[in-house]
Amino acid sequence: MTSASVRVLPSDKTLGAEIQGVDLRHLNDEDFAAIYKAWLDRSVILMRGQQLTDQDLIAFSRRLGDLDWAPIQETGRRFVEGLPEIYVVSNVIEKGEPIGSLGAGEAAWHTDMSYLEDPPKASMLYALEIPAAGGNTYFTGMYRAYEALPAETKRRIEGLRIKHDGTYNSGGYVRQGVTAVDDPVTSPGVYHPLVCTHPETGRRMLYLGRRRNAYIGGLPLAESEALLDELWTHASAERFAWHNVWKVGDVVLWDNRCTMHRRDPFDANDRRVMHRTQIKGSAPLAA
Ligand code: OGA
Ligand code: MN
């Protein structure tokens, strides 16, 4: 699909593109189709200079599919009042209470909410306030991570299933209503195939989720740990990652099935405010 106004500028990495010439509040079907195609091709896309209300963000997000409700925040509340689709990612504290989640620390490599049977297919962050330094977000591609594995490792992991932990969020905080268990064998979570086929592109990808409490079903714990360490070292090599140095007005939309992301820490005295939406997956990922 081509569009007269949409310009796609791929990064020099294996994923990521900037899309220029779009106002996400006013997109015709042709523009939207061009954006969707770029997102599938490049796995993560950046659209700068947007001016969106929460309703605008939700309206654009809905063009990709039904929206998930945001997870309960670390304070036990669900923000924004009346807009359960919006998750606030922020370190800001107002009247003694955090307005959002994930604080100012590092967020380790992860895929969003893969502890669900049917994780979101996409996540989108919209930047409202940005710290002077730090807080950059990195994305890495799990097609490449799979393709670049030695043939022997590909054979070894074929057919294995991996448990995605439901205990901790990416900031290391225990999720609401969950008792922390630090034994990967018994911690709560959901199994997915370790190698999945992307339901829209048909490409094969490594599906790791998050490292903490991950477990390869049926293996002795030490063997599972050794294999996971090997796969994580391989997949999270920073040289393959595309990253965004945020500006206010940036929208970053990622394919949550075939990427992982992480965030640098930043000065806790600075303010960082992002609003996030998530688009539901249509079916559990399959091998
Ligand atoms: C998220 C997330 C990272 C960031 O919202 O899912 O991991 O840069 N955010 O805030
Ligand atoms: Mn995340």
Image: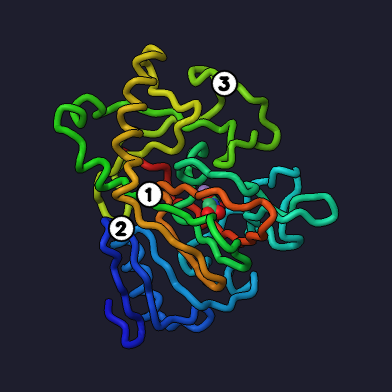
Give the CA distance from mark 3 to mark 2. 33 Å
Question: For numbered disc 1, what is the local secondary structure?
Answer: strand
Q: Is residue 236 above or below residue 92?
A: above
Residue 177 or 168: which is nearer the viewer? Answer: 168
Q: Amino acid at mark 1?
A: Thr
Q: x and y percent of residue 254 in the render?
A: 42, 58
Say whether disc 2 or disc 1 marks the residue closer to the N-terminus: 2
Q: Residues within 10 Å of mark 3 (few under 14, many from 20)?
A: some
Q: Amino acid at mark 3?
A: Asp
Q: Say which quarter of the image contains residue 16.
A: bottom left
Residue at figure coordinates x 40%, y 80% from the top left: 29
Q: Return the residue at label 1.
A: 259
Q: Return the residue at label 3.
A: 182
Q: How is the image coloured?
A: rainbow
Q: Return the residue at label 2.
A: 15
Question: For numbered disc 2, what is the local secondary structure?
Answer: loop
Side of 26 relative to 258 (left or right): right
Residue at figure coordinates x 83%, y 50% from the top left: 96
Give the CA distance from mark 3 to mark 1. 25 Å
- The outermost residue toward the left is 151
Q: Say which quarter of the image contains residue 173.
A: top right
Q: Amino acid at mark 2?
A: Leu
Give the CA distance from mark 2 to mark 1. 9 Å
Say whether disc 3 or disc 1 marks the residue closer to the N-terminus: 3
Side of 24 relative to 179 (left or right): left
